[in-house]
């Protein structure tokens, strides 16, 4: 077994969240999945329980918690039996709002972070475009300064929380002619009610059903200059920095998904009888379950080691400062390997279930579809390998 990296306080939080999900979320599974989003009242309840933005300072409405707290919350959200339930919350707390905190002025933090923690200000991160995903320097959405405003034009796609969000942390080109290209990228906080900001289609996904994903459009969208986060041209560095937190959380999420797949497979194999005995007693199934359990232990140990190294250090995007140990290579390894493992684990778990694994009434069928997002979102497996290759001098 991997070492237990969590304290009693972490485990108490886990129990509270698990109880909340069982009481408030699982009974609404059909509503959330068919509606294609998590309703506002659930966000507000999550906030009231302290499950949103826990790492932010108490003075701003958070709990001043460490990164491991975010990991515990991530694990339990993934284990909810509602497709994609945790994705929107993870993006909100661990991907979209951190740049606002570590780049924002005191006034910007006081304006928006308390709402992040209560669920009154749902955040999304506007980076991906039809022709630019991990290639952030190639974004085409522009923000042209005109007096005391920026005028934004362009579009974004695949934006988690795009439909329900109140605030978009938007990647824009404030200098489209800058060389190198990434030097022209900036981040601007754009409230949803800003004229010229329009939410497009809510995209229909095969998995992660209760998390909304949409297109965003900006046409002569005027935003006050004081919505700029940090300085012009500093957005690319901030995005790259926050990718490490985002991708480590994604790895934690994948490990939790693999654990769920293994548990579903084990329980079914013990209960399903064929030829007079549980199918877990057949060598083919038994050895496959052993392989799954072994692979899970290996990746969980690696990811937990990285979480401990990341937590409480200046690598943590919530922390002040920009120094600390560079874990980019290791986090990229963890992100891609954990996601690939979850795909394999859910696929094998479906096989163990046989025909029932292909039926919607069995949780493993949806887990199989949900797992596919892990190798795509937050940087594809191929992009992770490119990053690792650079660190290997290739």
Image (cartoon, grey):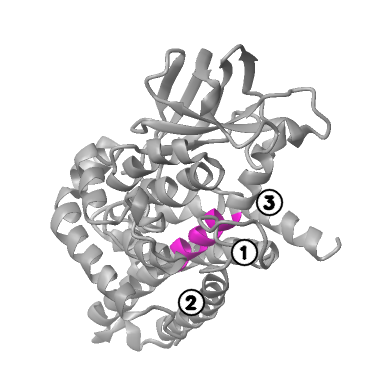
Question: Toward which corner of the image does residue 149 lie, by quadrant?
Answer: top right
Q: Which span is picked out in magenta?
A: 244-255
- Of the image marks 3 and 1, the number of the one nearer the N terminus: 1
Query: Is 382 on the left-hand or right-hand side of 378?
Result: right
User: Dominant secondary structure of the magenta stretch?
Assistant: helix
Seen from this angle, which residue lies furthest right?
A: 393
Give the alpha-carbon distance from disc 3 to disc 1, as whole Å. 12 Å
Query: Is 352 on the left-hand or right-hand side of 174?
Result: left
Q: Are marks 3 and 2 in contact (CB under 8 Å)?
A: no
Which quadrant does the C terminus fall into? bottom right
Q: Secondary structure at mark 2?
A: helix
- Of the image marks 3 and 2, the number of the one nearer the N terminus: 2
Q: Which residue is mark 3?
A: 383
Query: Is 70 on the left-hand or right-hand side of 336?
Result: left
Q: Secondary structure at mark 1?
A: helix
Give the alpha-carbon distance from disc 3 to disc 2, as whole Å. 23 Å
Residue occupying image coordinates x 54% and y 48%: 102
Seen in the picture, residue 277 relative to 148 is either above or below; the reply is below
Residue 157 picture location, percent across and down = 52, 30
Q: Which mark is residue 296?
A: 2
Frontmost of labels 2 and 1 is: 1
Viewer-closest of 167 and 59: 59
Seen in the picture, residue 350 relative to 305 is either above or below; the reply is above
Q: Which residue is mark 1?
A: 331
Q: Secondary structure at mark 3?
A: helix
- Label 3: how many Cα within 10 Å (few below 14, some 14–19, many 20+): some
Frontmost of labels 3 and 1 is: 1
Residue 246 among those drawn in magenta: yes
Question: Toward which corner of the image does residue 73 lie, by quadrant?
Answer: bottom left
């Amino acid at each position: 077994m991997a070492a237990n990296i969590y304290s009693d306080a972490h485990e108490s939080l886990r129990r509270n969240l698990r109880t909340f999900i069982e009481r408030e979320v699982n009974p609404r599974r059909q509503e959330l999945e068919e509606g294609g989003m998590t309703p506002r009242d659930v966000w507000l309840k999550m906030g009231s329980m302290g499950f949103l933005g826990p790492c932010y300072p108490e003075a701003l409405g958070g709990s001043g918690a460490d990164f491991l707290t975010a990991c515990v919350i991530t694990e339990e959200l993934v284990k909810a039996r509602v497709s994609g339930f945790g994705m929107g919350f993870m993006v909100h707390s661990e991907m979209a709002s951190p740049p606002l905190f570590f780049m924002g002025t005191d006034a910007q933090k006081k304006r928006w972070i308390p709402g992040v923690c209560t669920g009154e200000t749902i955040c999304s991160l506007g980076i991906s475009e039809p022709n630019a995903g991990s290639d952030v320097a190639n974004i085409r959405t522009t923000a042209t300064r005109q007096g005391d405003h920026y005028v934004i034009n362009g579009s974004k796609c695949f934006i988690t929380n795009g439909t329900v969000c109140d605030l978009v942390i938007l990647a824009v080109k404030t200098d489209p002619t800058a060389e190198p290209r990434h030097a022209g990228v900036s981040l601007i906080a754009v409230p949803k009610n800003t004229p010229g900001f329009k939410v497009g289609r809510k995209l229909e996904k095969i998995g992660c059903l209760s998390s909304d994903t949409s297109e965003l459009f900006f046409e002569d969208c005027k935003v006050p200059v004081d919505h700029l986060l940090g300085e012009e041209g500093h957005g690319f560095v901030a995005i790259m920095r926050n990718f490490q937190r985002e991708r480590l959380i994604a790895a934690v999420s994948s490990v939790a998904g693999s654990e769920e797949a293994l548990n579903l497979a084990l329980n079914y194999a013990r209960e399903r009888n064929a030829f007079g005995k549980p199918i877990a007693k057949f060598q083919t199934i038994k050895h496959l379950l052993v392989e799954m359990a072994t692979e899970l232990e290996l990746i969980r140990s690696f990811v937990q080691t990285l979480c401990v190294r990341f937590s409480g250090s200046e690598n943590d995007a919530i922390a002040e400062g920009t120094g600390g140990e560079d874990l980019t290579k290791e986090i990229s390894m963890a992100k891609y390997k954990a996601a690939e493992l979850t795909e394999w684990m859910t696929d094998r778990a479906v096989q163990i279930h046989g025909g029932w694994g292909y039926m919607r009434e069995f949780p493993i069928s949806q887990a199989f579809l949900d797992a596919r997002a892990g190798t795509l979102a937050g940087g594809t497996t191929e992009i992770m390998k490119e990053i690792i290759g650079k660190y290997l001098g290739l």
